[in-house]
Image (spheres, rainbow, N blue to C red):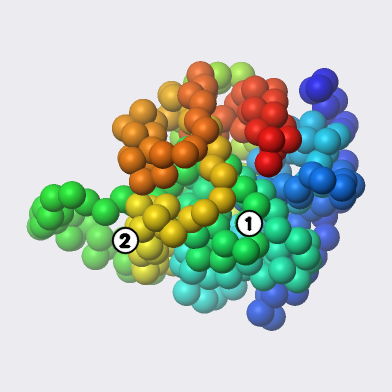
Amino acid sequence: MQTGSVASLTTTAGIYWQWRGQTIYYTKAGSRQEGKPALLLVHGFGASTDHWRKNIAQLQQDFEVWAIDLLGFGRSAKAKIEYSADLWRDQLYDFITNVIKKPVVLAGNSLGGYVSLCVAAQYPSSVAGLILLNSAGPFTEVQAPSKPSIIQNIIRYILLQSWASFFLFQFVRNRANIRKTLSKVYVDQSAITDQLVEDIYRPSCDPGAAQVFAAVFKNPHGEKVDVLLKRMQCPLLMLWGEGDPWMKSRERGIQYRQYYPNLTEYYLNAGHCPHDEVPDQVNQLIQNWMLTL
C-alpha cells in the first residue's frame, strides 16, 4: 500500500450522530466488503478522529473504516456530565449496534484502547476482534497498594478543586506545552507536525472543554484489565511502541499474555502513539491480521 498524499489525509468528511441528547462526531471511509470485518478506530485522551488520518487513508483501500470522537473530545459535544469508562463503553456499543449495525474490529490507542477492551469484554457480541495500541488501564495489584502520602493527598485535593483544574487546563493546552508533551512521547520528532499540535489544541477551545478535563480527576475507576481479559473471547492484536515513557511496554505485554495467552503482539520503534508515528508499519500489521479473521 502507498502512503496517502497530504490531500487524501484531509478529505474524509465527518458526520454527526445524536446519542443520549449529545452530538457525536464520526467519520466513515471505504466500502463494506463481503467476508471482511469493518474497523472502528478509537482515539486516546485529548486526541480525536484526526489522529487516525494516516491510518484511514491507507486502510480504507481494503476495509470499511470508521473513526469516532468520544463524548467530551474532538468535535463531539463537551457535555457537563460525569465521564467514565462505562459511559464511553456504552457510547461505542450503541454506535456499533445502531450505526454500523454489524460486529466490528475495534482498534484503540491509550484510553481508547482501554474503552475498546471494555466493549470487547462486556459486549462480546458486538466485537469480532480487538487491536490495542499502547493501551491504558490498571491491572489488579498483587500487593496491597501503599497508602498515599500527605503530599499526594494534598495534590489530589487541590486538583479536585474546579479553580485548580481550570488553571492546569489552561497551562497544558497551550500550543507550546502540547508540543513539549508530544516530544516526550514520540520517538521520531519529525512526526510532531504543526497540524498534529493544532488537532489537539483546537478542541480545547470548545465551550465545556475545561470541565471535561476537570472531570477526569473525579472519574470513577473502571474494571481492572485482567478482569476484562478473563471475560473476553475475541482475537487480540497488541501493537506496542517501545519508546513510550508513560508505559513499560514489555512489562505490560507480559501481563496481557498472562491473562490472555492466545494473542498476537509486535513491538515497534515508536512512542505512545505508534499508529501516528509509524503508520505504514501499523497499517500493514493491522491489514495482515484482519485478513486472518
* Front residue (pair 53, 142): 142
Answer above or below: position of 185 versus 108: above
Task: Tell me if I can see residue 61 in this picture.
Answer: yes
Looking at the rendered structure, the kind of residue marked 2 is Leu
Q: Which mark is residue 159?
A: 2
Could you tell me which quadrant the N terminus lies in? top right
* Residue 273, quarter of picture: top right
For the point 78% across and 35% down, the residue is 59
Task: Tell me if I can see residue 194 in this picture.
Answer: no
- The residue lying furthest to the bottom in this view is 21
Answer above or below: position of 251 versus 99: above
Whichever of callouts 1 and 2 sits on the residue coming sooner in the sequence is: 1
Residue pointed to by mark 1: 127
Residue 284 position within the rendered picture, expressed as x and y whole percent measured from the top left: 70, 26
Looking at the rendered structure, the kind of residue marked 1 is Val
Decide: few, some or many residues near mark 2? Use Cα within 10 Å; few <14, some 14-19, many ≥20: some
For the point 50% across and 30% down, the residue is 265
Residue 147 position within the rendered picture, expressed as x and y whole percent measured from the top left: 11, 57
Residue 289 position within the rendered picture, expressed as x and y whole percent measured from the top left: 65, 33
Answer above or below: position of 191 versus 122: above
* Front residue (pair 100, 19): 100
Label 2's element?
helix
Could you tell me which quadrant the C terminus lies in? top right
Label 1's element?
strand
Instruction: Judge depth for marks 1 and 2 and give the one in front.
Output: 1
Q: Is residue 113 left or right of residue 184?
A: right
For the point 62% across and 64% down, the residue is 125
Q: Is residue 43 left or right of residue 172?
A: right
Residue 27 position within the rendered picture, expressed as x and y whole percent measured from the top left: 79, 53
For the point 55% across and 20% down, the residue is 189
